[in-house]
Amino acid sequence: MVNRKYAPDDPANGSPGAPRMHGVWLARGAEGRFSVYVPRDGGVIRWTEGADGRFTGPVPLGGGGELWPYLGVGQGPDRYVHMVGIRPTDTGDGHVELVYSAQFQTGRPNVEWKSFGHSNTKAPWYGNPAVAVDPQGRVYVFTRNGGGGVSCRARKDNGAWHPWWDLKGNNTDRNPVAMITGAGLVELYTSTHQGLRRYIQKESGAMPVAEDVLLTPLVQGTLAAVTGPSGHVTAFYADGLGKICAWSPGRGLAPTAFADAIGTGPITAVNCLIDGYECTLLAQCDEQGRTAFAAYLTEREETGLNWTVSGPPVTNPPVLTTDAAGAAVAAALTPDGGVVVTRQKDEPGLALEAWTRI
């Protein structure tokens, strides 16, 4: 059994060929207002929501004109925004390094971008980093390494960074998904050419360790995940056979095909409130590039789900998050580089406002 990738590698001149963001690039601040972060023209730009609900910007956040069109974003309970980008080193040989910045208050300047190297010291692009922030505010950055496994660099309580940890593995997905469990522990979900793999943290602040690969068909690059009311993570992916599957090892849920896929590409997911019930909202693009949404009662995969198509064509399924009241909010990139957003209406069922360009 050999699993296929969502799309062929497209490292144009050694870099990913199309803009892509992971994590909460639509981020809610401590006061409830949202910011949108997008890599563009070698840097990162930001739009900020005002008190009237309208976005202003874009405002440049730096990057030196060299950042590739990728951005990983993570948030902890303090709502600080932690950003990780990729840029070429100054050696001129196609090697890259990871760079880090943070924003602590909505609409305020970010801290200066700083390099924290690469797990292979000098390396071409091997994959896109995933970011997680634990309840203590420690930042964890995961990336595929030159051996095809996973490496992690974590921030210490004093703000310094640990050396790179080699978490082992091989043939892993270039786009892993990092999560925080209900117990505040970090987990990483990825895949290999053979199946699914989870890396777990056994105590707060410790180095995550790899579990055995679980053999199952899947399409690499389609993983998404949420943490449910049980405190366990549920991962979602496309199996390449026309189905959306769920996997929650903490709950004892084996890989389970529970719904038809509407497309073949990546999935995004979030938990939100619908009619007062905690539900899991999934998004995937259909074959025309339009967003399709579907929701089900969280951790009740036996109920299945149905898709509803919404909005204009977009480049990837939208980032999904929630407002302070638990209602869903989504943002996506359009093919011309614009950003569109929508919100859940305050009415029965999963009703969304019209998509608005910011």
Image (cartoon, helix red, strand yellow):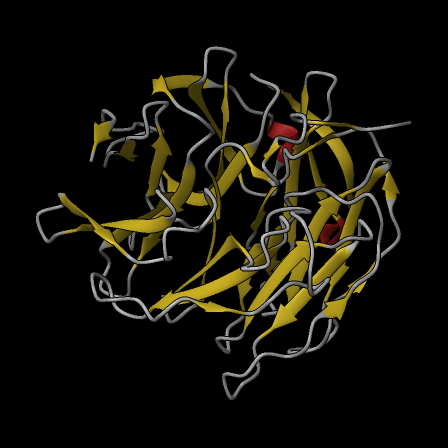
Residue 138 vs 329, above or below: the answer is below
Asked if residue 77 lies left or right of residue 166, the reply is: left
Q: Nearer the viewer, residue 283 or 347?
A: 283
- Residue 276 x %, y %: 37, 43
Q: Position of residue 175 (x, y in %)?
A: 63, 43
The residue at 75%/72% (across/down) is 202
Q: Position of residue 308 (x, y in %)?
A: 43, 18
Residue 259 placement, left or right of 73: right
In the rendered image, the residue lying farthest to the right is 1
Q: Nearer the viewer, residue 122 or 273?
A: 122
Location of the N terminus by quadrant is top right
Q: Residue at x 67, y 49 (%)?
A: 124
Q: Quadrant of the C terminus?
A: top left
Q: Nearer the viewer, residue 207 or 238?
A: 207
Using the rendered view, name the quadrant where residue 221 is placed.
top right
**Residue sitting at 38 percent across and 47 percent down?**
42
Does 116 sit above or below residue 59? Answer: below
Q: Is residue 277 in view?
A: no
Q: Position of residue 311 (x, y in %)?
A: 32, 20
- Residue 351: tell me if it is visible: yes
Q: Is residue 214 above or below residue 345?
A: below
